[in-house]
Image (spheres, grey):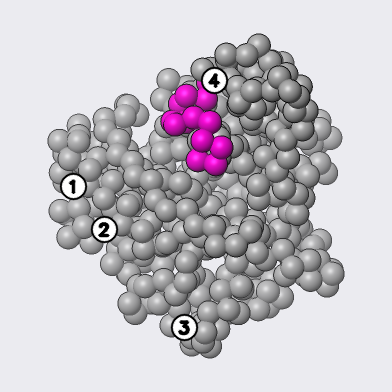
C-alpha cells in the first residue's frame, strides 16, 4: 500500500502525519516551538526552529508508522499563512526572526498606504485589505530594518517566502523557490484575477521582484526532497495554506459549502466556485486550493484569537494545566454568569478589522469564578465565529446565493463538545465534525496524492 506524508506546519507546533491510501491516519508526530513576543503587538518565530521541528516530526512519524521514505508516494505541505521569512539564497540562513501573521508592527505603514489611496487597488486586485495581517508589509519592514537587506534583495541575493516556501527550500536543499496560489494570494502582492504577481503593488510597496518565489497550482510537481533528509528522495506533490487545505480536506468543492477551523485563530471559508466574489461585509476574497490548475475562490473570515484564548487561560492565567481541561472547567457552571471575554490580544480580525483593539473582560461580579471566565472564553470563540457566518450569509444572499446550510468543523478545539454545541446553538444549523479531524493535513495529502496519481 502506498502512503502519503503530510507536513502540517502550524502557528504553535510542527506536525507530520502519515496517511494510508484510504485517508486514515497511520502515525502522527508533533512538536511545539517557541513563541516570541519582543514588544506589545509583535509576534516572532525562529524560522530555523520551525524547519528543525518539522524535519524531526517527519522522521518521527515515519518511524512510528514503521515505514521508510521509499514507502511514501508523495509529500504534501500545509502551513500557517502570511508568516514572513527572508533568507540568504547562498547559505539558506534567515536574516531575522520570522514575522508571524498575528504581528501588528506594520500598522503605521498600512495607515500610510491607506492615506495614499492604495486600499481600493489592493482590494480590487488581491481580494484583501490593507492590514498588518498579510505578508507584504512584513516583508517591507524586514527590507527597511535589517541592515543592507534592501540592497542585497535588489541584487538577487535574498529570498522571500511564507512558511511553505521556506520548507520547500529546505526540503529540496535550496533547489526550489516556489509557492502555491493559495499562499501567494495572502501576500497583498498577487493579482487573484490574473493569477500573477502584480507589478504595480510591488512598486507601491517597494518590494524588489527578485525576492519572490515562483507560483504554481496547489497540486503540482514541487520538486523532490534531498535524499539525506529522510533516507531517500520523495516527490513533493501538494502545497496549500492551512485554511485552503482544510477546505479541500473537508471536501468543500462546491459553491456554498463552508468549513471553520478552530486552531490558534478561527478561519471560516466558503467556497465560491470559479469566480471571485467581493464582500460587502468585512470578509476577504482568497484563492482556494487549485487541484487541476483552474482558478478556484473562497470568501474568508479570520478570527485572530480562537483556541489561543485557551492557551492564555493555561499559560497566562494558569487557570488550567492542560488545554484539554477547559471543557470540564467551563461545564462546571451552567452559564458564564454575565461575564464576557473579548480576546482581542492582537486586535480584531473580520468582520471588524480593528488592529488597535485589545482584550477585555467585562461583567465581573463578586461571585465570578475562574470557571465563569473559562466558559466566557469558550463562548468568545463561538461568538466570533457566528459573526463571521452571519457576514458570509449576507454576502451570499446579496450575490444570489443561499445561506450556509451546515458548517463543517475541524482543528484542535473542534474536539471540545461543549464549544461545538455552543456553536450549533448560536448558528441554528448543524455543526458537522468529521471522523478524521486532521482535515488540514488531509487536504495537503489529497493534493499530493492526486499529483502522483
Label 3 CA crowd tier, 10 Å (few <14, some 14–19, many 20+): some
Q: Which residue is mark 1?
A: 69
Disc 3 to disc 4, C-alpha distance: 54 Å
Whichever of labels 3 and 4 marks the residue nearer the N terminus, that label is: 3
Circle 2 packing at 10 Å, graded few (<14), some (14-19), many (20+), is: many
Q: Earlier in the sequence, mark 2 or mark 3?
A: 3
Q: Label 4 to label 1, Cα distance in Å?
A: 43 Å
List the residue tagged with mark 3.
156
Instruction: Tell which tag, 4 or 2, sits nearer the viewer.
Output: 4
Secondary structure found at label 4: helix
Q: Please give left or right for residue 5 compared with residue 255 in the image.
A: left
Q: Which residues are magenta?
A: 315-327
Which mark's residue is nearer the viewer, 3 or 4? 4
Mark 3 secondary-structure assignment: loop
Residue 60 screen position, x and y as percent: 22, 43
Above or below residue 225? Residue 432 is above
Task: State the CA–CA distance, disc 4 to disc 2.
Answer: 45 Å
Mark 2 to mark 1 CA distance (whole Å): 10 Å
Q: Looking at the image, do the residues carrying marks 2 and 1 touch, with CB atoms under 8 Å apart?
A: yes
The secondary structure type at the circle numbered 1 is helix
User: How busy is the neighbourhood of tag 1: few (under 14 within 10 Å), some, or many (20 plus)?
Assistant: some
Amino acid at each position: 500500500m502506498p502512503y502519503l506524508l503530510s507536513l502540517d506546519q502550524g502557528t504553535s507546533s510542527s506536525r507530520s502525519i502519515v496517511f494510508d491510501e484510504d485517508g486514515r491516519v497511520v502515525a502522527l508526530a508533533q512538536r511545539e516551538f517557541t513563541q516570541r513576543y519582543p514588544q506589545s503587538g509583535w509576534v516572532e518565530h525562529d524560522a530555523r526552529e520551525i524547519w528543525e521541528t518539522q524535519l524531526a516530526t517527519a522522521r518521527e512519524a515515519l518511524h512510528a508508522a514503521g515505514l521508510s521514505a521509499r514507502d511514501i508516494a508523495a509529500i504534501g505541505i500545509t502551513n500557517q499563512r502570511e508568516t514572513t521569512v527572508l533568507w540568504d539564497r547562498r547559505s539558506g540562513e534567515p536574516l531575522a526572526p520570522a514575522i508571524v501573521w498575528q504581528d501588528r508592527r506594520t500598522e503605521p505603514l498600512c495607515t500610510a498606504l491607506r492615506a495614499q489611496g492604495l486600499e481600493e487597488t489592493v482590494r480590487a486586485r488581491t481580494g484583501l485589505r490593507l492590514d498588518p495581517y498579510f505578508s507584504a508589509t512584513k516583508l517591507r519592514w524586514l527590507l527597511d530594518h535589517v541592515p543592507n537587506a534592501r540592497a542585497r534583495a535588489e541584487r538577487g541575493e535574498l529570498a522571500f517566502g511564507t512558511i511553505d516556501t521556506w520548507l520547500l527550500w529546505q526540503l529540496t536543499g535550496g533547489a526550489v523557490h516556489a509557492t502555491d496560489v493559495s499562499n501567494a494570494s495572502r501576500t497583498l502582492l498577487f493579482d487573484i484575477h490574473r493569477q500573477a504577481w502584480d507589478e504595480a503593488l510591488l512598486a507601491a510597496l517597494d518590494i524588489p521582484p527578485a525576492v519572490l518565489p515562483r507560483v504554481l497550482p496547489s497540486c503540482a510537481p514541487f520538486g523532490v526532497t534531498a535524499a539525506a533528509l529522510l533516507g531517500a528522495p520523495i516527490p513533493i506533490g501538494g502545497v496549500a495554506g492551512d485554511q485552503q487545505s482544510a477546505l479541500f480536506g473537508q471536501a468543500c468543492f462546491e459553491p456554498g459549502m463552508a468549513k471553520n477551523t478552530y486552531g490558534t485563530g478561527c478561519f471560516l471559508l466558503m467556497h465560491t466556485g470559479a469566480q471571485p466574489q467581493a464582500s460587502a461585509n468585512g470578509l476577504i476574497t482568497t484563492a482556494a486550493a487549485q487541484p487541476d490548475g483552474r482558478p478556484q475562490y473562497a470568501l474568508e473570515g479570520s478570527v485572530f484569537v480562537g483556541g489561543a484564548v485557551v492557551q492564555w487561560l493555561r499559560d497566562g492565567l494558569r487557570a488550567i494545566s492542560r488545554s484539554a481541561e477547559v471543557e470540564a472547567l467551563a461545564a462546571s457552571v451552567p452559564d458564564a454568569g454575565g461575564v464576557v471575554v473579548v480576546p482581542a490580544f492582537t486586535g480584531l480580525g473580520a468582520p471588524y478589522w480593528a488592529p488597535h483593539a485589545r482584550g477585555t473582560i467585562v461583567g465581573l461580579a463578586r461571585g465570578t469564578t475562574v470557571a465563569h471566565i473559562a466558559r466566557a472564553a469558550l463562548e468568545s470563540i463561538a461568538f466570533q465565529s457566528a459573526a463571521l457566518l452571519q457576514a458570509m450569509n449576507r454576502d451570499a444572499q446579496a450575490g444570489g446565493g443561499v445561506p450556509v446550510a451546515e458548517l463543517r468543523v475541524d482543528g484542535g478545539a473542534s474536539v471540545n463538545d461543549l464549544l461545538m454545541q455552543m456553536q450549533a446553538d448560536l448558528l441554528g444549523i448543524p455543526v458537522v465534525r468529521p471522523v478524521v479531524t486532521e482535515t488540514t493535513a488531509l487536504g495537503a495529502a489529497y493534493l499530493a496524492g492526486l499529483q502522483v496519481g
